[in-house]
């Protein structure tokens, strides 16, 4: 839980009462490798802080799994569109390793926003950062070569190859595993 407190404290001041509320409202959850925290068409009711492990979000297109993003320790994760709008998700969330997360459900999240201005500021900051990241990442992404997309992924997640199956990386990049292998050999 200390990683979560430090992460929140890096954005907003955490008073003793606010810290206790974080302890009271986030639930420790152990997640087994290959376990899915969210299924497509279900509504994302939880926001997760990853203390340990790696996850991917993915969706299916023409019966193929497409990895949309990878998350690792000390990051926040959910199906963002589904969580914020409380609408069914088009994504799945899957553990790629045995993992430990802290989860808060949407109702507790909203309660903390009302109770603690610092949490409201934190939640806004988190949403703004996620929106800005997605906007800049994907707008530039579609004009990049496969190698450039791979380099950008490595900049965000340097050890991705050690923690994520190459086939998942290839689907995220929109290329075949063979093309990914050629790109990796040229590095």
Image (spheres, helix red, strand yellow):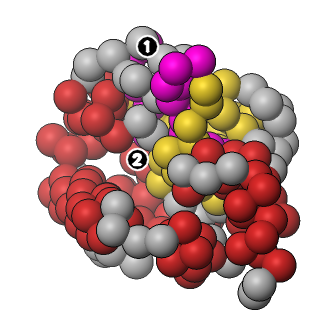
Going from N to C along the chain, the mark reached first, 1 or 2, is: 2
User: Label 2: which residue?
Assistant: 21
Closer to us: 187 or 86: 187
Residue that appears at 66% across and 25% down: 36
Residues shaded magenta: 42-63
Q: Residues within 10 Å of mark 1 (few under 14, many from 20)?
A: some
Q: Which residue is drawn at 61% across and 26% down?
A: 64
Query: Does the segment drawn in magenta span residue 2?
Result: no
Residue 59 colored in magenta in the image: yes
Say if 147 sits above or below 90 in the image.
below
Of residues 68 and 99, the one nearer the viewer is: 68
Q: Are marks 1 and 2 in contact (CB under 8 Å)?
A: no
Mark 2 residue crowding within 10 angstroms, few (<14) / some (14–19) / many (20+): some
Q: Quadrant of residue 181?
A: bottom right
- Most distant residue in the top direction: 41
Q: Can you see residue 164?
A: no
Q: What's the magenta bit mostly, secondary-structure-wise? A: strand
């Amino acid at each position: 839980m200390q990683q979560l407190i430090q992460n929140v404290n890096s954005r907003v001041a955490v008073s003793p009462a606010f810290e206790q509320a974080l302890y009271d409202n986030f639930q420790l959850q152990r997640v087994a490798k290959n376990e899915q925290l969210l299924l497509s068409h279900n509504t994302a009711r939880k926001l997760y802080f990853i203390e340990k492990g790696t996850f991917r979000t993915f969706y299916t297109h023409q019966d193929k799994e497409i990895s949309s993003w990878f998350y690792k320790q000390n990051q926040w994760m959910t199906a963002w569109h589904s969580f914020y709008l409380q609408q069914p998700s088009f994504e799945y969330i899957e553990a790629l390793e045995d993992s430990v997360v802290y989860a808060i459900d949407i109702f507790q999240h909203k309660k903390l926003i009302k109770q603690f201005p610092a949490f409201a500021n934190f939640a806004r900051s988190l949403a703004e950062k996620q929106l800005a990241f997605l906007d800049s990442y994907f707008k530039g992404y579609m004009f990049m070569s496969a190698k450039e997309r791979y380099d950008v992924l490595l900049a965000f997640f340097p050890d991705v190859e050690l923690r994520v199956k190459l086939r998942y990386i290839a689907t995220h990049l929109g290329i075949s595993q063979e093309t990914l292998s050629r790109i990796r050999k040229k590095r």
